[in-house]
Image (cartoon, rainbow, N blue to C red):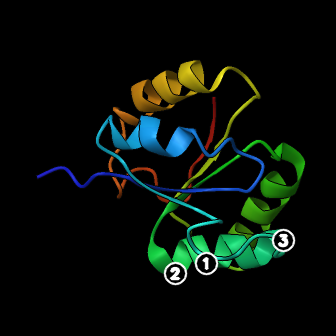
């Protein structure tokens, strides 16, 4: 059975993405859900890793660096989805379409650009 990818949304991602992705079958958490607003990127990334969630962000530069740090430290993450800013409905469709080709196992340590 294919394991559904769970997604943890950075605070710069529109919270409307949550119900849109949930309607497509994804499990989604936001920083607001987790009471983590305003915490550092590394703390957010570590939290997503602890929960085994892929991380969705618009913050390309910082999260490319964090992914490189994880690799250099021989640590695993559950995927980072770096999305350009666009209409939230279009973004949800694109994320669902791209992630349909991945499982929780195959997205591990991947950086995806959407």
The quarter in which the C terminus is drawn is top right
Q: Which residue is mark 2?
A: 50
Q: Find residue 62 and name its label.
A: none
Q: Residue furthest left?
A: 1
Mark 1 or 3, nearer chain start: 3
Is residue 47 rendered to the left or right of residue 24?
A: right
Are circles 1 and 3 on residues that touch, CB within 8 Å?
no
- Res. 9 visible in picture: yes
Question: Which one is nearer the viewer's eye here, 93 or 70?
Answer: 93
Q: Determine the residue positioned at 56% across, 50% down.
A: 110
Question: Which one is nearer the viewer's eye here, 101 or 68?
Answer: 101
Describe the element under mark 1 as helix, strand or loop: helix
Is residue 20 rendered to the left or right of residue 58?
A: left
Question: Which one is nearer the viewer's eye here, 55 or 107?
Answer: 55
Q: Determine the residue positioned at 68% across, 70% down.
A: 45
Is residue 7 rendered to the left or right of residue 24?
A: right
10 Å neighbourhood of mark 3: few (<14), some, or many (≥20)?
few
Question: Percent position (x, y) of residue 91?
Answer: 58, 26
Are circles 2 and 3 on residues that touch, CB within 8 Å?
no
Q: Give the number of the mark in front: 1 or 3.
A: 3
Q: Determine the residue positioned at 35% across, 56% down.
A: 104
Q: Residue furthest right?
A: 61
Q: Is residue 88 above or below residue 6?
A: above
Describe the element under mark 2 as helix, strand or loop: helix
Are circles 1 and 2 on residues that touch, CB within 8 Å?
yes
Q: Find residue 38 and name its label.
A: 3
Q: Is residue 37 above or below residue 28?
A: below
Question: Percent position (x, y) of residue 105?
Answer: 35, 58
Q: Which residue is mark 1?
A: 47
- Res. 75 visible in picture: no
CA distance for labels 1 and 3: 13 Å
Q: Determine the residue positioned at 70% across, 72% down.
A: 44
């Amino acid at each position: 059975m294919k394991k559904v990818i769970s997604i943890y949304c950075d605070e710069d991602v529109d919270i409307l993405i949550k119900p849109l992705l949930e309607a497509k079958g994804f499990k989604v958490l936001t920083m607001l859900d987790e009471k983590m607003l305003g915490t550092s990127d590394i703390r957010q990334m570590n939290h997503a890793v602890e929960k085994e969630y892929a991380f969705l962000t618009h913050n390309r530069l910082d999260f490319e660096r964090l992914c490189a740090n994880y690799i250099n430290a021989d640590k695993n993450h559950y995927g980072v989805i770096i999305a350009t800013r666009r209409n939230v409905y279009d973004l949800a469709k694109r994320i669902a379409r791209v992630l349909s080709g991945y499982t929780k196992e195959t997205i591990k340590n991947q950086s995806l650009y959407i």
